[in-house]
Amino acid sequence: MSLALNFLIQTILWFGFMAAIIFGAAGTMDYAGGWLYLGEMAVISAVFGLHMMRVDPGLLRERLKPPVQKDQPLADKLVLIPLLLLMFGAMGFMAADAARWHWSRMPPFVQWAGCGLLLAAFSFMYWTMRTNSFAAPVVKIQKDRRQAVITTGPYAIVRHPMYFGALFYSAGTSLVLGSWWGLATVPIVALLLGIRIGIEEKALRTGLDGYDEYAHRVRYRLIPLVW
């Protein structure tokens, strides 16, 4: 299957799945926050995905692989699966909160601010991917692609910038979907990412030359000046 066709099929399936969760939980198709979120995510995915297809097809091919892979440590599988379940479950909860239960009452300007936060989060994560061509979605050493330590761009600030951006993605999702209660998922995501960072650091320190020296220079793992 060509890379372009694989990207198209996975994008359609991914957004179909997200739409089913969001509108199924909302109990209605008349949910502006749901349409706003899916619309922005579709545009961002298309623009960034098509650009990556042109400038770094190898990384896009890696990121289109399944979330559970052969060379992936068992510990990463045990963390990644709950993380994905949390993401989908939280998405449904936020939609139900905003459109079915009406627990949250969020002004439209806050939802539009959430759109800006989502765009900023994805722009930062895309900067990370453009800096690091080995930013695979699973923990593994990519010996076939001659993986090397990346020390420039956002990696000069924190050792795991993709996860840093993911925290803002989680917050932005909650705002766009119109759920104040959804913001409570951000610290849970941070906790799971912190556990995964420990697994990833172990793999990188034992399997990637130069990572120990890099970790000594860049002290912070996830949040600058904090941890």
Image: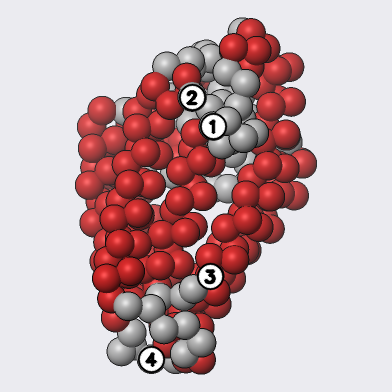
Q: Secondary structure at mark 1?
A: loop
Residue situated in front as seen by the camera: 225 or 218: 225
Mark 2 → mark 1, Cα distance in angstroms: 7 Å
Q: Are marks 2 and 1 in contact (CB under 8 Å)?
A: yes
Rendering quarter of residue 202: top right
Please tell me which residue is depicted at 49% across the width and 24% down the height of the picture: 157
Mark 2 → mark 4, Cα distance in angstroms: 43 Å
Name the residue beneath numbered marker 4: 28
Residue situated in front as seen by the camera: 215 or 181: 181
Mark 4 → mark 1, Cα distance in angstroms: 41 Å
Name the residue beneath numbered marker 2: 157
Of the image marks 2 and 4, the number of the one nearer the N terminus: 4
Q: Residues within 10 Å of mark 3 (few under 14, many from 20)?
A: many
Of the image marks 2 and 1, the number of the one nearer the N terminus: 2
Name the residue beneath numbered marker 1: 224
Q: Are marks 2 and 4 in contact (CB under 8 Å)?
A: no
Rendering quarter of residue 83: bottom right
Amino acid type assigned to the residue bearing label 4 in the image: Thr
Q: Residues within 10 Å of mark 2 (few under 14, many from 20)?
A: some
Amino acid type assigned to the residue bearing label 3 in the image: Gly
Amino acid type assigned to the residue bearing label 1 in the image: Pro
Please tell me which residue is depicted at 64% across the width and 33% down the height of the picture: 227
Rendering quarter of residue 200: top right
Please tell me which residue is depicted at 27% across the width and 66% down the height of the picture: 112
In the image, farthest residue toward the front: 225
Mark 3 → mark 4, Cα distance in angstroms: 19 Å
